[in-house]
Amino acid sequence: MRKIVLISLSTFALGAAAMASADQLTRTKGQDTYKMLELFGDVLVKVKSQYVVPVDDKKLIQAAIDGMLTSLDPHSNYLDPSSFGDMREETRGQYGGLGLEVTSEEGAVKVISPMDGTPAARAGVMAGDFITSIDGNSIIGMNLTDAVKQMRGAVGTSITLTIVRERKPPFTVKLVREIIDVKTVHSRPIGEIGYLRVSGFDQRTGEETTAALKDLKSKIPHMKGLVLDLRNNPGGLVDSSVEVASDLLDGGEIVSQRGRDPKDIERYNARPNGDMVRGVPIVVLINNGTASAAEIVSGALKDRQRATIIGLTSFGKGSVQTVIPLRNGADGAVKLTTARYYTPSGQSIQKTGIIPDLQVARSKAEAEAVSDTAQQYSEASFKNALDSQEGKVRSAPEEIEIPADKPEDKDKDKDAKPKQRPLRSAFTLTDEDVAADFQLQRALDVLRLGGVKQAKLQKPVKVFTQPKSTFAKTDAASAPGATPGTAPAKDAPKKP
């Protein structure tokens, strides 16, 4: 079994006195550790003997372990045997539940993203929604793992969630639990352009991507371009992201992992002659829900100048977690952050994210949310996130392209939020969905017109300007602007 040393102490000693000081320092640190462990035992005894109701020792100790790990960063945590089994099911791409990627923020369960084609997605649950109660019982303040367990259950049984959404009164949605057999890859032709939607990275994503690209090539023999849609893709397995990137690159580096030891560097390279679309121009669509493994793919294609990136700055999760079974899983597992990953140019995107070549929002409301520091939701908003690369900060764009007002919208209340279609998989993506998706339309413009510059010159669009919030017809390029604030959040994402 892989052994990972968590604590190391190295000293340079000059002479016997220095060596003695080092030995004394080691003994002192060891004594401090034993003293704190003794304190933990004392507290456990007090709770066990004096708490108002009887307590379960096992649950207390597991909670203490989880607290220790989650204090390190938002993505390290303890998985009890049941949760460890659930995680293994998720990475295989099939499990029972609702199809939600969730996290915990200020005592409430927050939706990161609904998964394509699942009960949650069909019911209209959206990224950023808060789930406040289950079947009429409040879950405010509940441990995230316990809340997720309540949302899971027997296939065919129903569950009612109370949802709180910004600027709307609370409402309920009734869902029926299903086997979530997640197909992470869907594709379809859009004229002479291929569209490839990748919604996550599990053990089957690589082979599904290869099959989807072969299918697109057979349907579009003279393909003029490819749109790779990674919006609201929360990530997953690093190996799967490497497989996907390998299908679009001819050799060379995709990503590197670097641990606490400067010599601990692991590099992942694409297969030689692996580009399945043979140099066809590629546009990658991203947004602030594009995280982790999805950022590996978009970062590699951008750094290798293989693709143009369009959309909104990605989430900014540039850390790698290793799942370490305890007693072969009998005692669960530790999910521990063990490395940072770096794009081929040597850049860490921790907290900062992948910045698009063309900033485009799907609606004015989305542009406002991205520019509003109080509404920021990214890795940088986690209170105890790992530090970013020295001197780097997450920046909000000064200008974001947004859809022009439709004639039928002119008489509506100017403060009313326009309805926004949820992101759909290519399997359900209709021509009407394509026409209504402004980010996708701009991706198609870039491919059909020959690049970002040509698309901006030939199709001037409406632009949301930060921080003055003014609108104008322009062909000016996007530029980084003010640094957003942060909002506290905790716990690693989970999937009910």
Image (cartoon, rainbow, N blue to C red):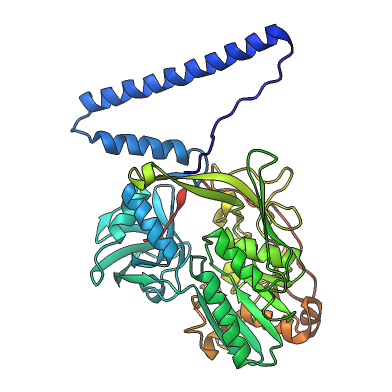
Classify 245 as above or below 87.
Answer: below
Residue 14: x and y in percent read 74, 13
In percent of the image, x 55 and y 30: which residue is there? 7
The quadrant holding residue 115 is bottom left
> Can residue 6 be seen here?
yes
Q: Depth check: 415 or 208 in front?
A: 208
In percent of the image, x 62 and y 61: which residue is there? 295
Q: Depth check: 4 or 96 in front?
A: 4
Classify 420 as above or below 331.
Answer: below
185 horizontally vs 95: left or right = right
In which quadrant will I find the C terminus?
Answer: bottom left
Residue 161: x and y in percent read 31, 64
Classify 42 as above or below 485.
Answer: above
Residue lying at the far front of the rendered structure: 1
Q: Depth check: 398 or 438 in front?
A: 438
Residue 74: x and y in percent read 50, 46
Residue lying at the far top of the rendered structure: 17
Residue 351: x and y in percent read 63, 51
271 horizontally vs 406: left or right = right
The quadrant holding residue 327 is top left
In percent of the image, x 42 and y 67: which residue is there? 93
Q: Depth check: 491 or 180 in front?
A: 180
385 horizontally vs 178: left or right = right
> Can residue 437 be seen here?
no
